[in-house]
Image (cartoon, coloured by chain):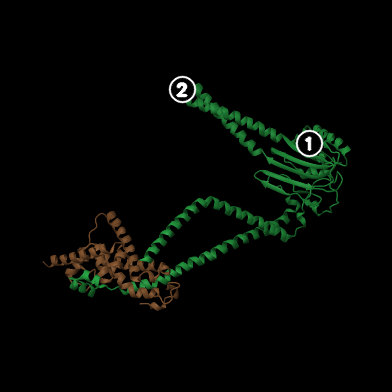
Chain colours: A green, B brown
Amino acid sequence: MSSTDWNELDGYEALVSELRAAAPVAPDRLRERVLDGAPEFRRRMSRRRRLTLVVLPAAAALAVGAALVHGFVSTGSSRSSDAPALTAHAVTGGIHRALVHGRPATTTADAGKLTQQKGYAPTGTADENAFSDYRSAAMPASKSVTLGAARQALNIPTNRLVHAVASLQVRVKSRQELSAKTNEASQIVGSLGGYAQSVRYENSRSGYGEAVLDLRVPVQKAETAMGRLAGLGVLVSQEVSTQDLQTKLNHENSGIGSLQRAIAVYESALNSGTLSGSQRVIIQIRLNNARRQLSHLRHARTGTLASGATADISLLLTTRSQAIVAHHHHKEGRLGRLLGSAANFLGLEGIIVLYALIVLSPIVLIAALAWWIVRERRRREDRLLASA
Amino acid sequence: MSDVNALPAAVRPPGLVGSPSFSDVVAEHLDAVYRYLVYLTGDRAAAEDLAAETFERAFRSWRRFDPRRGAPRTWLCRIAHSAAVDWFRAEARRQRREESYSRDDARLEESVFAEGLSPELERALRRLTPAEREVVALRVLLELDGPGAARVLGISSSACSTRLSRALKRLEQEMSDVLH
């Protein structure tokens, strides 16, 4: 303490001496508490850091492990789906998994919709250009399959209302034959009660010709129509998708029934003459709303029924010799499929994480901002304290 | 008491060879910080808690402490001051919440500041405000110089000097009142 400082205490020597002589001393328990607390605090910090170092790799390992397990399970189950007993009836009781010349059709199912993707036949006669179920995959590529098998493979459900969309690519021998086959396709559809909505015929001088026909046939005749259309030449590819409309129709029917009952109740209430003026107005408004909804629902049901009544078939007749190039999944090994499936699953996990991040990002941002503010405040305080 | 030298080397400020370790600082300044807090709060139990909190805070920012920029005692007193201010705020809230806060008579009779003090000085110290006791603790007990005490208090040196002068005068006056 400087002499200047001592001057401030001049005249209070006795007081100062007494205060200094009887200065309080920190108890031993406090000393122990402070000295024990510091390393403990340090341990707490390192434990948190260690936890982060363990949790993050563990989560990553778990994600990769789950992807590999999913890949293993899905590639394992694909073998069982090869079995004839499991010919993809699952979702709509619908379309068989099919392939042409040993290539399995890819089938995607989603909420009442089941899509059967292209078969592929680079060579073969008309009768050979047909679907077969996966049992045929074991057959040699040159093995013929019948048209009947093709019809059976399509199997558009008849016990439910469905909307079917199909597309066929058929190769014909020459440009001369193209014209005849185009007419024949229209005749086939007409004979089955359908019609050609549009026909585009193109005959190029360079040597190839194409005809694109948008056909509508009754859905019950769709399988027959496709079988016969496939017989017009060499079937290059075929794609069929069905969408179940039965549930939608059921909802519309039940909605119409409910509205009709409600309208009857409103009308009888209005005719009873027991309602007050304001009640009559309210009931009248409700009646008008119900009638409007009924009209709307009836219109929708008509559309649903119309959509389920016909199948849309898009037919491409072509003279081009090149078939659609498709890669052969069956040539990949089990390991390749496993890795592919695992990669897909990892991608899905990534999407989920990304989605979660997007959803949580505002909260994370606010939390990060709050954390940063607190950290900055603490640092400022530390700087202040350090500068004291 | 645990051996202060048993603390890990990490408790030394980084890059400062030959600077005191945290355990050395604790050993050297714990009494001073405790005294300061006893005088400031007038409550030994609270002073103990606050001293522990002070050293925990100090440990947290120990790596950033540069002894060339200030004495450890002044630095620790700043932290203790900050902790005590928080404590006073919490106490004020608690008292407002409880509405009726009265000190226990028995507690008033017991020695708070030190066992060796005369009863007159003890009573006179109790009658001082925390701010007055604080400046007395810093200048008299901890023997901080004027600028150091002023930095702890967050006031100018002249204001600190004035506060000390008033505190000592009032302390003497209170003692004479008690005697008469």
Residue kind at label 2, given as amino acid type: Thr
Local SS, label 2: loop
Residue kind at label 1, given as amino acid type: Leu
Residue A245 position by quadrant: top right
Looking at the picture, tell me which residue is in the foreground, A198 or B81: B81
Position of the N terminus of chain B, as image quadrant, is bottom left
Q: Is residue B165 above or below residue A219?
A: below
Looking at the picture, tell me which residue is in the foreground, B78 or B147: B147
Q: Position of residue B67 (x, y in %)?
A: 38, 71
Q: Which mark is residue A213?
A: 1
Mark 2, Cα crowd under 10 Å, few <14 / some 14-19 / many 20+, is few
- Seen at 66% across and 55% down, the residue is A344
Question: Callout 2: residue from which chain?
Answer: A
Residue beneath label 2, please?
Answer: A274
Q: Is residue B5 left or right of residue A213?
A: left
Local SS, label 1: strand
Looking at the picture, tell me which residue is in the foreground, A171 or B61: B61
- Seen at 76% across and 46% down, the residue is A118
Marks 2 and 1: same chain? yes
Mark 1, Cα crowd under 10 Å, few <14 / some 14-19 / many 20+, is many
Residue B5 visible: yes
Question: Callout 1: residue from which chain?
Answer: A
Q: Position of residue B30 (x, y in %)?
A: 33, 72
Residue B153 position by quadrant: bottom left
